Amino acid sequence: MPTDLMRASAPPAQLRSSARNFNIVAIVLTAALVALQLVGLALLERSHAHAMQTSAPHEAAVCAEEPAADVSQIPTD
């Protein structure tokens, strides 16, 4: 009779182990996705900074020129 109780209690231990493994896999996948998002954000920031750095001299050259005509200001209330 004690062996029947041991056999009956064995499958829940395996289910707990399986659930624990599933939780570990879910945590690892979540961490990997967060890491990928951070890498993507860093690359986006880098490309944006590079684009702003290369466009800055062009804008400075355009702003340095004097306008051909005076621009009238719109009065505000």
Image (cartoon, grey):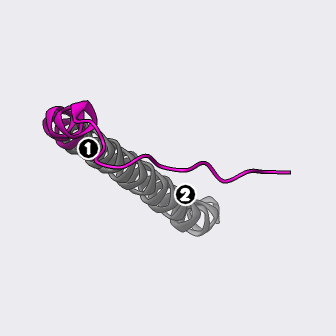
Q: Which amino acid does label 1 sit on?
A: His
Q: Which mark is residue 16?
A: 2
Q: Is residue 24 left or right of residue 51?
A: right
Frontmost of labels 1 and 2 is 1
Q: Which residue is drawn at 27% across and 47% down?
A: 44
Q: What element carries label 2?
A: helix
Q: What's the CA distance linking mark 1 and mark 2?
A: 48 Å
Q: Is mark 1 on a helix, strand or loop?
A: helix
Quick check: 76 above or below 65?
Answer: below
Q: For the magenta stretch, what is the residue range?
A: 50-77
The N terminus, quarter of image? bottom right
Instruction: Give the residue pinned by disc 1.
Output: 48
Quick check: 3 above or below 35?
Answer: below
Q: Is residue 8 left or right of residue 44?
A: right
x and y, in percent, of residue 50 in the image: 17, 37
Q: Which residue is drawn at 47% across and 49% down?
A: 71
Q: Quadrant for residue 22, please give it.
A: bottom left
x and y, in percent, of residue 48 in the image: 26, 44
Furthest residue toward right: 77
Mark earlier in primary sequence (1, 2) = 2
Furthest residue toward front: 69
